[in-house]
Image (tube, rainbow, N blue to C red):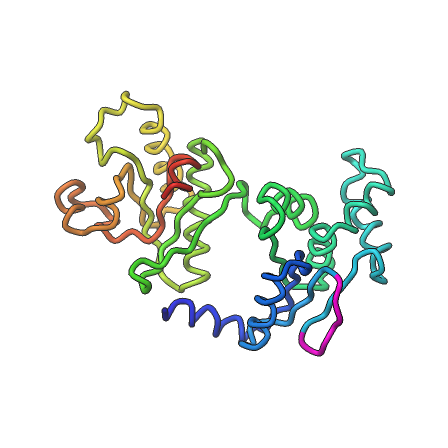
Amino acid sequence: MAVLDDIADASRAAHPHIVLSEGDDPRIREAAKRAVQEGLARLTLIGQGTSSDDIAFVDPAAAPQISDYAQAFFELRKHKGVSEEAALAAVTTPLGFAAMMVRAGDADGTIGGAVHTTTDVVRTALQIIGKGAGVDVVSSYFLMLLDEVRPVVFADCGLILQPTEEELASIAIASSASLTALTGLAPRVAMLSFSTKGSVPSGAHESLSRIARAVEIVQERAPDLLIDGELQFDAAIVPSVAARKAPGSPVDGAANVFVFPSLSAGNIG
């Protein structure tokens, strides 16, 4: 799997400091050992354990920086009615402490979600770390390997139930950037549907006009991005099908970013 090897090599070169917020889970501890053995990162685990040269354990309640983190969180969220007591409680949680490490520059990134729900992980990240520069919609993506060698991105499969046309456009642009960041590939975006280029009348379902407008928004905001829609999955991924169903498509049956019209479709996909 060359793409995973390339990602691993990039991580070894950067050697980031990553915080694993669920360090008491046996799966996380085993993953941490493997990551260190492979030289992927410097790791801090939130939980109870004995630190070594390669893996540090931190108990938030006993951490020397906890008062600074609590004050920083209070200043960040006091406009939302958060008290100093509530701020201390928030940053003493594993997710909150890990996110504060990133916000304070004490770590490069944090990973969670094996124990906590997606909602908890995303909420904490938004409250403490915030959105990236230029990002107007928080969405998710999966990096998929077709036939174990061809990397593609599926989005959004985890957060937005029914994306608006603006949200679909933002998902397409952000997911394209993620594909390039991970793989170096130029994105080719397919806005997926049950219809291909008008095979179902546009008035048959609201998603068709929503997808069409999303494509227009992407073309306005990112004119150099190759995108087409609406496309059925086969027309997006099989060149011979694309030639028949969507002749002249800029994606040409070689999409590597697949934007689904709803969370249910994406998650099932």
Quadrant location of residue 16?
bottom right
* 117 falls in the magenta region: no
User: Which of these two is toward me, 167 or 264?
Assistant: 264
206 above or below 8? above
Whole-percent x, y for residue 30 in the image: 59, 67
92 above or below 24? above
- The residue lying at 18 percent from left, 41 percent from top is 246
- Residue sitting at the far front: 26
Whole-percent x, y for residue 215 in the image: 35, 38
How many numbered marks are there?
A: 0
User: Which of these two is toward me, 59 or 209?
Assistant: 59
Quarter of the picture holding the C terminus: top left
Whole-percent x, y for residue 135 in the image: 54, 46
Quadrant location of residue 244?
top left
Horizontal side of 262 relative to 40 (left or right) equals left
User: Which of these two is toward me, 220 or 9?
Assistant: 9
User: Which of these two is toward me, 259 or 95?
Assistant: 95
Quarter of the picture holding the N terminus: bottom left
Q: Main secondary structure of the magenta part?
A: loop
- The residue lying at 50 percent from left, 44 percent from top is 139
Horizontal side of 59 relative to 200 (left or right) equals right
User: Magenta segment, which residues?
Assistant: 48-54
Horizontal side of 207 relative to 159 (left or right) equals left
- The residue lying at 74 percent from left, 58 percent from top is 104
Horizontal side of 111 relative to 140 (left or right) equals right
- Residue sitting at the far top: 203
Whole-percent x, y for residue 71 in the image: 84, 49
- The residue lying at 59 percent from left, 74 percent from top is 36
* 51 falls in the magenta region: yes
